[in-house]
Image: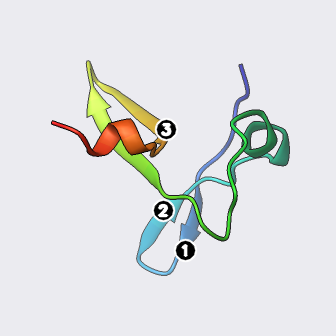
């Protein structure tokens, strides 16, 4: 587990995602999109995949 502090970005707040996590998920920062959602009082972030588009 990695602990991070939130940082203010304009009127919003964010976190910096460590490169090791980006590499571990094989995220191409130029092309890939992320899905962010709340479930059971937790924030989940995952790489969007083609199967994520199917209903």
Which quadrant, please, contains the N terminus? top right
**Mark 1 lies on residue:** 9
Which quarter of the rendering shows the C terminus?
Answer: top left
Asked whether, in this view, residue 52 is left or right of residue 25, the answer is: left
Q: Looking at the image, tell me whether mark 1 or mark 3 is earlier in sequence order.
A: 1
The reply to whether dot 1 and dot 2 touch (C-beta < 8 Å) is yes
Residue 46 percent coordinates (x, y): 49, 38
Seen at 65% across and 45% down, the residue is 5
Dot 3 corresponds to which residue? 46
Give the Cα separation between the discs numbered 2 and 3.
19 Å
SS of the residue under disc 1 = strand
- Give the CA separation, mark 1 to mark 3: 21 Å
The picture quadrant where one finds residue 22 is: top right
- Give the left or right position of residue 10, taking residue 5 as reference: left
Question: Considering only order in the chain, which callout, 3 or 2, is on the residue closer to the N terminus?
Answer: 2
31 lies above or below 25? below
Q: Residue at x 33, y 39 (%)?
A: 52
Q: Which residue is mark 2?
A: 13
């Amino acid at each position: 587990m990695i602990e991070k502090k939130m940082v203010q970005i304009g009127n919003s707040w964010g976190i910096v995602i460590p490169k090791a996590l980006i590499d571990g998920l094989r995220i191409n920062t130029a092309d890939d999109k992320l899905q962010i959602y709340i479930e059971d009082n937790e924030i989940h972030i995952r790489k969007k995949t083609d199967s994520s588009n199917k209903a």
